[in-house]
Image (cartoon, helix red, strand yellow):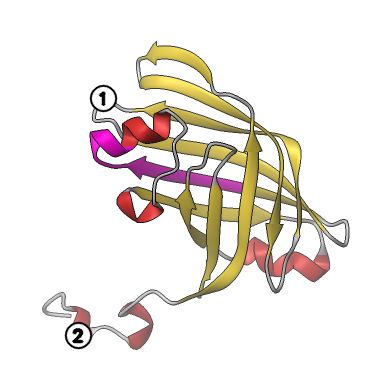
Amino acid sequence: MSTLSLDALPDVQKGIHTRPLFVMHLDVEPIVRFGPTPDGDRRVGVITGGRFEGDRLSGEVLGGGADWQIVRPDGATTLDVRLMLRTSEGVLIGMFYRGLRHGEPAVLAKLAKGEHVDPAEYYFRINAIFETASPDHAWLNHMLAVGVGDRRADGPVYSLFEML
């Protein structure tokens, strides 16, 4: 390939295609603040439960997960989350995601006070992978998902999409 051009690539590389996976709400205890660390302002949100609902996958989020966050000096928050999901059929699924949330300082201040802000006013995106021993759900072991978040006072709500 003499030049790098999107037009010269196969169709599969010209865009991202997705399909809905599920919508998820997490119940989170009040944030535990570690304070300034070498990486930034460390905070941890312990996840006590939640639920997820989609056409192919629905169930509950089990307690015991956590969101290890860093608030960077530029005000952006990075997320590092591990969750346990249990489908309505009783199948256990591990969900692991990283994310990034940032916005204008006034918007972030409202979020910090627990006020609801239209999710279109700030950037809140995640990328997820899954792990399960269930043969019927093994398709989850071979996919990446992306999501858009909405930080609410009672915990975040995500819309997740399978990347095709």
Q: Position of residue 43 (x, y in %)?
A: 48, 22
List the residue tagged with mark 2. 7
List the residue tagged with mark 1. 73
Q: Quadrant of residue 99?
A: top left
Q: Earlier in the sequence, mark 2 or mark 1?
A: 2
Q: Amino acid at mark 1?
A: Pro
Left or right of 37, for residue 8: left
Mark 2 vs mark 1, CA separation in Å: 38 Å
Q: Amino acid at mark 2?
A: Asp
Q: Position of residue 38 (x, y in %)?
A: 35, 15
Left or right of 14, for residue 53: right
Check the image and report above or below for 114 versus 11: above
The residue located at (67%, 42%) in the rendering is: 83
Magenta residue check for 100:
yes
The residue located at (61%, 60%) in the rendering is: 23
Secondary-structure class at tag 2: helix
Q: Nearer the viewer, residue 35 or 5?
A: 35
Check the image and report above or below for 9 versus 70: below
Instruction: Identify the magenta region.
Output: 96-107
